Image: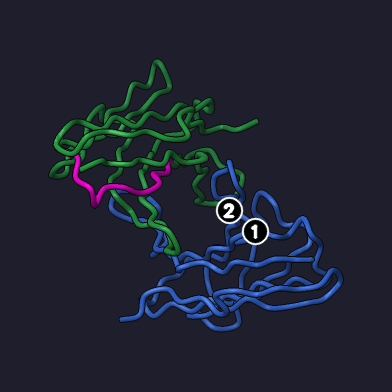
């Protein structure tokens, strides 16, 4: 059973509009969350993170929101740019059996249309 | 600074063959990881290492072995390849805390096909 879920395999938005990528988790022990971005034929690269003591973290055009009671986080990209087209992975850690490890969601493919 | 590099980038094996994937990092990171990524699934941890000479099992370790003889290198071995091991393999490294500003840095991946 997947502990980190990204229920939208793909998302398309117009350039300049807001992109909202969602992530849900089931393990209440998770206390640290990250978003990674992945281009084809490259490894994932870190985008933004949030600790469970916060409900929002912002970095330029990227904002991550955390709703602990709903076990839900979201990544907002404003404004969206064509270069943002990539696969976005949500990852979570805390209470893991595998040392300091992250559990990754399946990813959401974002397409930003010019 | 090359970051995290992986060798080879592509490989095709026949069932039962063996091979070793090499990961190298030049950031003096303590922790290193091997993941596999399959369609519709997130990255799943195979094995990891918290320092030179140490290794530990991750979520999906069966059929793989690893070694960390040098701090900068982390090797992933397949002793007898099976079609179920067809996947994209990513190596990653981190300073070691995976908290606050720590993060994992990933290599470009190795696409392995087992026929």
Q: Are marks 2 and 1 on the same chain?
A: yes
| Label 2 SS | strand
Spot the blue chain and give its letter.
Answer: B
From what the image shows, is residue A105 above or below residue A24?
below
* Mark 1 belongs to chain: B
The answer to whether residue B57 is left or right of residue B10 is right
* Mark 2 belongs to chain: B
Which residue: 64% across, 53% down? B58
Numbered label attached to residue B87: 1
Is residue B18 on the magenta stretch? Answer: no
Q: Which residues are magenta?
A: A80-90
Tag 2 near tag 1, CB within 8 Å: yes
| Label 1 SS | strand
Spot the green chain and give its letter.
Answer: A
Residue B30: percent from the left, percent from the top? Answer: 45, 70
The answer to whether residue A80 is left or right of residue B14 is left
Is residue A87 on the magenta stretch? Answer: yes
Residue B88: percent from the left, percent from the top? Answer: 59, 61
From what the image shows, is residue A84 above or below residue B52?
above
Residue bearing mark 2 = B37
Pointer 1 local density, CA inside 10 Å: few below 14, some 14–19, many at least 20: some
The answer to whether residue A110 is left or right of residue B39 is left
């Amino acid at each position: 059973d997947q502990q980190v879920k990204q229920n939208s395999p793909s998302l398309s938005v117009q350039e300049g509009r807001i992109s909202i990528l969602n992530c849900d988790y089931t393990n209440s022990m998770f206390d640290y969350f990250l978003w990674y971005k992945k281009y084809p034929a490259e490894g994932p690269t870190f985008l933004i993170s949030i600790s469970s003591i916060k409900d929002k973290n912002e970095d330029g055009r990227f904002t991550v929101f955390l709703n602990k009671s709903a076990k839900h986080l979201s990544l907002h990209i404003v404004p969206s740019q064509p270069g943002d087209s990539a696969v976005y992975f949500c990852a979570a850690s805390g209470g893991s059996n595998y040392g300091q490890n992250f559990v990754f969601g399946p990813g959401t493919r974002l397409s930003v249309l010019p | 600074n090359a970051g995290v590099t992986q060798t080879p980038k592509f490989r095709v094996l026949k069932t039962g063959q063996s091979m070793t994937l090499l990961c190298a990092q030049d950031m003096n990171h303590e922790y290193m990881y091997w993941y596999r990524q399959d369609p519709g699934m997130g990255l799943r941890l195979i094995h990891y290492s918290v320092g030179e000479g140490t290794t530990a099992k991750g979520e999906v370790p069966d059929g793989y072995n690893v070694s960390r003889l040098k701090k900068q290198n982390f090797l992933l071995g397949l002793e007898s390849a099976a079609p179920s091991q067809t996947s994209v393999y990513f190596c990653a490294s981190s300073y070691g805390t995976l908290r606050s500003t720590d993060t994992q840095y990933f290599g470009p991946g190795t696409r392995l096909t087992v026929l």
